[in-house]
Image (spheres, rainbow, N blue to C red):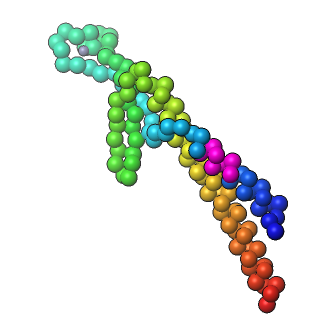
Amino acid sequence: MATNRETTLEKQIEKTKKALVALGDIRPGSLSKQYNVCGKPGCSCKADPPKKHGPYYQVSYTRKGTSSSKFVKKEDLPEVRKQIKNYEKMKLLADRWIDLATELSNLRVAKEKAKITART
Ligand SMILES: [Zn+2]
């Protein structure tokens, strides 16, 4: 028979899995804003004070040890922000799942051991 703690852990794992499935699009990385200077002579980006071009938005991320970045159009910012947030949530949920699953596994292994000890 399952103990109370086991049942609680199973329920929490189910909840975590459901939350993971419900996340929607994900994207790793962080957004940054940039202002650039061009090469056009007499451009206001080189005036005093300078009026640089931009802002340009960029999403930077590292996958399998390789860093990349990609420009993001202003109109895509809300979607990309949401995807990045979802990715962070996904990591938190996966961590939670791992913690819950480890505790559950420890409980079950301990129970099996107790059963074997009781038999011998
Ligand atoms: Zn310029």
**Where residue 33 sits in the image (x, y, percent)?**
40, 26
- Residue drawn at x 78%, y 79% is 114
As drawn, which residue projects farthest toward the bottom? Answer: 120
Splitting the image into 4 quarters, where does residue 60 fall?
Answer: top left
Q: Which residues are magenta?
A: 14-20
Q: Is residue 49 left or right of residue 13?
A: left
**Where residue 54 sits in the image (x, y, percent)?**
34, 18
User: Which one is in front, 104 or 38?
Assistant: 104
As drawn, which residue projects farthest toward the left? Answer: 41
Q: Quadrant of the N terminus?
A: bottom right
**Ligand 1 is located in which of the four quadrants?**
top left
Splitting the image into 4 quarters, where does residue 112 fall?
Answer: bottom right
- Residue drawn at x 31%, y 13% is 50
**Where residue 99 sits in the image (x, y, percent)?**
65, 57
Q: Quadrant of the C terminus?
A: bottom right
User: Which one is in front, 74 or 8?
Assistant: 8
Splitting the image into 4 quarters, where does residue 31 fall?
Answer: top left
**Where residue 64 sits in the image (x, y, percent)?**
38, 52
Q: Is residue 23 left or right of residue 51?
A: right
Q: Is residue 49 above or below residue 22?
A: above
- Residue drawn at x 83%, y 60% is 4
Count how many numbered circles sit on residues in the image. Answer: 0
Q: Main secondary structure of the magenta part?
A: helix
Q: Is residue 70 above or below residue 62?
A: above
- Residue drawn at x 77%, y 61% is 6
Q: Is residue 81 above or below residue 4?
A: above
Is residue 56 a member of the stretch shown in magenta?
no
